[in-house]
Image (cartoon, helix red, strand yellow):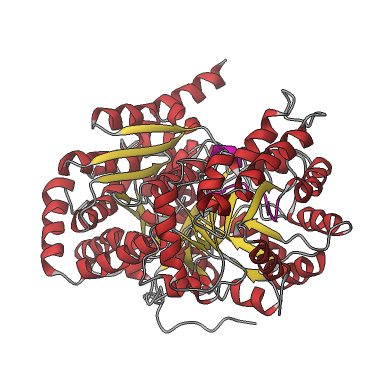
Amino acid sequence: MNPVLPNSFRSGPDERGHFGIFGGRFVAETLMPLILDLEKAYADAKADPAFQTEMNGYLKNYVGRPSPLYFAERLTDHLGGAKIYFKREELNHTGSHKVNNVLGQIMVARRMGKKRIIAETGAGQHGVATATLCARFGLDCVVYMGAVDVERQQPNVIRMEMLGAKVIPVQSGSRTLKDAMNDALRDWVTNVHDTFYCIGTVAGPHPYPMMVRDFQSIIGVETRAQMQEAEGRLPDSLVACIGGGSNAMGLFYPFLDDPSVEIFGVEAAGHGLTQLHAASIAGGRPGVLHGNRTYLLMDDDGQIQDAHSISAGLDYPGIGPEHSWLHEAGRVTYLSATDEEALAAFLLLSRLEGIPPALEPAHAIAKVMELAPRRPKDHLMVVNLSGRGDKDIPQITEILKGRKK
Amino acid sequence: MTTRIDACFAELKKQDRSAFITFLMGGDPDPATSLEIIKALPKAGADIIEIGMPFTDPMADGPAIQAAGLRALKAGMTLKKTLELVCAFRVGNDTTPLVLMGYYNPIYIYGVDKFLADAKSAGVDGLIIVDLPPEEDTELCLPAIKAGLNFIRLATPTTDDKRLPAVLANTSGFVYYVSVTGITGSASANASVVGEAVGRIKRHTKLPVCVGFGIRTPEAARGIAAHADGAVVGTALVDALRGSLDPDGRATAKTIGAVADLTASLAQGVRGAKQAAE
């Protein structure tokens, strides 16, 4: 049976926060009143032109937007197919797309009078962005980070601490992003009166998936205008990596109703899909975790399984609910790249373009390496270069050193 | 329809005392010991028994109950085995109410309709599902009521008068008032603040109001029970259980006794409450 396709792929979520069967508000009662307050505060902010004006000012002069759309000439020549453009989100202040969302949420938190901000982080990019904006606006900042990630992303831990944030290494479970989110939720339940939870991706209870998507959509909005200027038309395809999927939603969302645009999300296949990985769409099924229904990695008893990826930012057993819906609706094609493929892409891009990508978008580049050669030279492909690789250099150095022995 | 929970509170009313409700994780530290512990609870003074359904990511629980869930999962506990535990308990006890408490995902994966049918026939009386607020009632709450199970809702310090009617609307059996904003086993409940909150909830409902989170000692249980229809103790019992295990986390000869002894002294605290309040 084919599902009935909606008139628009941009109409979700409904008033209860559902994208089809996905999304929702699966949280403890303690949090529910605050989540309803947040929904209202965000709706008010969205309707307030002064909010938009203020945000645009910070996006331009503090974040450094618009980020360039760059024609990757040497990568294009090397692959010999589609014309490849990079959306240079790694050039934003703090080094990734994360800051787009954090700026928006911190401005909402200020409207709500919240003085204490908490966040979870995997690779540390969301944590760094949150610590940065908390410093800028004089707010207390506590970042939960899995102990494993604290080890493999040291440069970002040091940065967050220098910015005045308190980084709490999370020792429970697999000690990665999932567990950081559990502990952030536990903090929120405990300190609900004065604390704002700044979620880093398009997941969690409604309104987070929608709100984060809206704040990240500037990526796609700019891409549309920049491609129009560069080539006089829409791109033919979009490629972005997915952990929770916020950089991908931000790029994809403004193009969802353009049927000529092929859209690819790239999950982390870790050691391979038959082994440890983090590809929830390829290897999971719908379940309920962290406030929403979405594709999750789990066993037959509904127990959540540990994810694995070389990239701390993709090392999560779930995915944003809107992605689950776009997958089932067939609008977005979800692929996956292994640790090895991502590492090879990291090295290739560093040498060919002088741009070391973060290990997260290296997964997207890995699939561009497969997709681009199979497309004609007039095919315009945009890949979201969502973060810079500086934070990964110690980890990659260790891996490469291990191989030489 | 009168459930075991309704009958229990009717009987307690006759005796003019509050309920003592225990929480332990099903399958902690292993399924066989867990059954023996739960069998020992009514005799030790538990009026209602809550059994935790282990879950890998219990986001409203503190370290003690997180660890209890992981011990149970490591010992092979599953939702199916939790229902088997209930069945085995019911062989010798058809009166003590049993409430399953946990998170939605394992039930969703088991299949809601199948779970409700199996839980009912196993002898479960009620459900407390932490991550299902009234906004998600169509998922499990309404089907559970239809299947003849009580759906016991949590009310919290953040549930204001405006929201209480929505929280109470489909609640049955009793209302579980979470006495602190926080996770299980963190802060201590303040009896007089709790008393006010219970009074506020009682203005909106005729259901019994029981209080949990932050009650660790017989004295605290007595203080809370003086203001409420029941007191729930979880983390303190889980801690007593853990303290009796060997260094590898396995049950010892002391395990069942450690939990039963603490249950007995907590139950004494609760039983002394109404008289003390008068």
- Decide if residue A163 is on the left or right side of residue A13: left
Q: Residue at x 48, y 40 (%)?
A: B186
In the image, is residue B219 above or below residue A22? above
Q: Residue furthest right?
A: B91
In the image, is residue A391 above or below residue A47? above
Q: Nearer the viewer, residue B66 or B44?
A: B44
- Decide if residue B53 is on the left or right side of residue A321: right
Q: Position of residue A348 (x, y in %)?
A: 42, 37
Q: Position of residue A237 (x, y in %)?
A: 40, 63
Looking at the rendering, in which quadrant would you find the N terminus of chain A?
bottom right
Q: Residue at x 48, y 58 (%)?
A: A28
Q: Nearer the viewer, residue A344 or A322?
A: A322
Find out whether residue B259 is within the magenta segment: no
Residue A355 is at least partly visible in this image: yes
Q: Position of residue A54 (x, y in %)?
A: 11, 58
In the image, is residue A369 above or below residue A229? above
Find out whether residue B50 is within the magenta segment: yes
Write down the region rendered in magenta: B46-67
- Decide if residue A233 is on the left or right side of residue A182: left
Residue B61 is at least partly visible in this image: no
Q: Nearer the viewer, residue B86 or A66?
A: B86
Looking at the rendering, in which quadrant would you find the C terminus of chain A?
top right
Q: Residue furthest top?
A: A405
User: Toward which corner of the image does residue A168 lie, by quadrant?
Assistant: top left
Q: Residue at x 18, y 52 (%)?
A: A65
In the image, is residue A92 above or below residue A263? above
Q: Position of residue B232 (x, y in %)?
A: 59, 51
Q: How many marks?
A: 0
